[in-house]
Amino acid sequence: MKLNYFRMLDKIGNSMGIVPVHLSRNSMVKDSISTGSLVCDLIIGGGWPLGRWVALFGPEASGKSSLLYHTLRDAIRKNVNVEFFDFEGSSDPLYLSKILEMNLNNVFGLRKPGGTWEITPQCRYHQPDLGETYFRYMHRILKELPDKLSHDNRWFYVYDKKPAKESFDKKLYRATKRYWVEADDSGAQVIWFIDSLPAMLPEKRDEKDESKEIGLQARMFSQYIPLVKSRLARKRCSIIAVNQTRLKPMAFGNPEYEVGGEAPKFYSDIRLQCRSCSNIYGKGQVVEEPCWDGIGVDKYRYIKIATRKNKCFSPFRNSVMRIWMEEKGDIGRGLDPVFDTYQYLIETGQIDEKSHGKKMVIKLEGLWTQRMWSWQEFKELILNPNKVEVYEKYELNDPEIGKISEDKVKDLTNVNYNVEEDLKKDVSKTLEEVEKILEDKLNLRERCKEQIRNDTAFELYFRAISGIDGTSAKEPEKLCGNCAHFHKSEECMLVDDDTEGCDQWMSEEEEEEMLEEEE
């Protein structure tokens, strides 16, 4: 008689409430929380995955908090329960409101004098001090929350005790002796933001002002991080923590180290390093450019990001972001969406890298492929909220827009208020229809996000980095046989003694004639 090992596992596991967890790449990308940066989402594998411990670390002024605020914006827009632990107490309300693009009362709530909520918060903001207190707080919440598991392409909350009102799946109850209540979606239950780990004060250091015990903070992390880390995955909760780097005095080799010992590094699933850098396309730390509308000046600085550890995607990837410091003399908007979109298209081989500051051709399918764009025009394409104005100014053509606004779109911005009311309503309705269509068709960033969501971006990314100038081994016919350059370039004109020149420098008609003669 042959022992049915898997049947025995199911029997013992179900009696003890131990159920295998299903892993899915599609679910990981679909439910992940965006960092707010296309290039950052690209190098970490689609965004911050659920059920993980994520660490952002780097020296001062390296964009860690800005990246955290953009992540908070995406989490709020997805209606995820969020708690923000600001141990440093250094969040700037004005800067935060610029990034979130929302009234902070609607984000963090507003209490009445009696203590009840007048506006229910989407994110609970805390300014704590003691680290152990809030580790115990997170641990208790994780114990109270039900497991959130996938079964047969459906998501369930799994309870040990019978829920009061919700109906549960009786078949799964008989099999596992636990109560499976179907969930509305596969999203996160809670996400915690910690800014930052070095500011978490151990209780002993708070009690004794001059404690001589060393390594108190490292011991705290070693003791309490496993308590919360072990439950994150099956509860569909995440922790995104900011850490700092310091310099070791009299050290050999790299003097930089992360605060808090080895436990935060060991238990992290993704470790993203941020570091200030100079302008990669020019000189200097701070760059000044005209605003997208030509009125005023914007100031930017550059940040280099690199994945030092990644259990969810290919590790050791790096890219560059740009921080929008000032906008027309006012505080900036955090991560620059224009440079971020441009850099993403470079990383995926959809714009030539040499095109910065010159005319560029966008290869991503859309209305923007109809013309070449200068850098200033590219900024307006991304930032101008009036898509009708962009459509008309750059003489773009779309059959659907032409049908809807064939006789009226030219006069939409200069309506004659002496005309009849019916005509004015008709013109207004047409404008709304055109704006809705163009908001979708001219939204280049949304098209890039769609590539990340359906995994197309990663295919393009690896294809771009696996060959020369974005060409992979799958397309050897596009490589020049003599000098191995992509398409035509000035280097192709170089002639060695052993070669007769570069055939790739010929025009397409000359190449076709040459191939016909050879055949």
Image: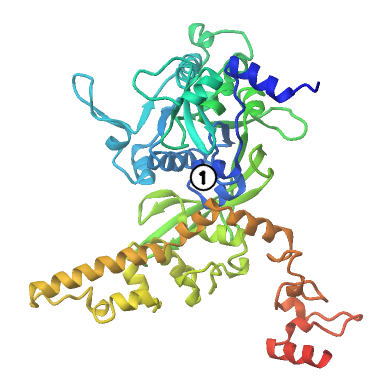
For the N terminus, the image quarter is top right
Q: Is residue 9 left or right of residue 32?
A: right
In percent of width and height, residue 519 lies at 82, 89
Q: Nearer the viewer, residue 453 or 86?
A: 453
Q: Going 50% across and 76% down the picture, which residue do you hit? A: 372
Q: Going 56% across and 57% down the picture, which residue do you hit? A: 344
Q: Say which residue label 1 marks.
A: 30
Q: Residues within 10 Å of mark 1 (few under 14, many from 20)?
A: some
- Residue 25 found in image quarter: top right
Q: Is residue 421 left or right of residue 174?
A: left
Q: Going 23% across and 74% down the picture, which residue do you hit? A: 412
Q: Going 56% across and 41% down the picture, which residue do you hit? A: 28
Decide: is 349 above or below 489. Answer: above
Give the structural element (helix, strand or loop) at label 1: helix
Q: Is residue 233 left or right of residue 161?
A: right
Q: In the rendered structure, which amino acid carries the disc numbered 1?
A: Lys
Q: Nearer the viewer, residue 250 or 310?
A: 310
Q: Nearer the viewer, residue 198 or 328?
A: 198
- Residue 245 found in image quarter: top right
Whether residue 296 is visible: yes
- Residue 381 found in image quarter: bottom left
